[in-house]
Amino acid sequence: MENKNAYRKMQSETILAQMGGRRLLLMTGAEANIGQDKDGRAELTLALRSIRKAFRVTLRNDLYDIEFFRVSRTGEKIILNSVEGVYADNLVEIFERWSGLRASL
């Protein structure tokens, strides 16, 4: 079980690296939460405090599912946009389009 968790963490870190890594975090002021979802799939959640929204990327097979959401004052998750089956090279483009923030210079 421990090896599986370490593998999921590595996959989540790879998702962050594909999106720009530390540069993305610095450019957007995002806070990254690396881990796995309730089904055990690798997941990266970026909390975008400047626009009070979050961006979640989940690895499913070789493609990614993406959710752009905000959390209400009552703690309810309100999904603003979502897409399934995204290739890695489209992650940054979708992030920039939905968040309105630039991921690089």
Image (cartoon, rainbow, N blue to C red):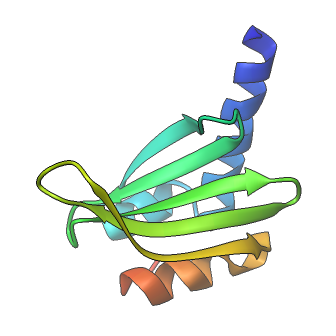
Q: Residue at x 74, y 53 (%)?
A: 59
Q: Position of residue 62 (x, y in %)?
A: 88, 59
Residue 1 vs residue 16: left or right?
right
- Residue 14 seen by the camera: yes
Query: Residue placed farthest to the right in the image?
Result: 62
Q: Position of residue 4 (x, y in %)?
A: 79, 20
- Residue 105 seen by the camera: no
| Foreground residue among 22 and 78 | 78
Q: Position of residue 24 (x, y in %)?
A: 47, 65
On the image, which quarter does residue 73 sit in? Answer: bottom left
| Foreground residue among 40 and 74 | 74
Q: Position of residue 89 (x, y in %)?
A: 76, 77
Picture quarter with the N terminus:
top right
Query: Residue placed farthest to the left in the image?
Result: 73
On the image, which quarter does residue 77 sit in? Answer: bottom left
| Foreground residue among 84 and 8 | 84
| Foreground residue among 31 and 72 | 72
Residue 96 vs residue 69: left or right?
right
Q: Residue at x 72, y 22 (%)?
A: 6
Up-down relation of residue 46 to residue 79 (above or below): above
Q: Residue at x 71, y 40 (%)?
A: 41
Q: How many marks?
A: 0
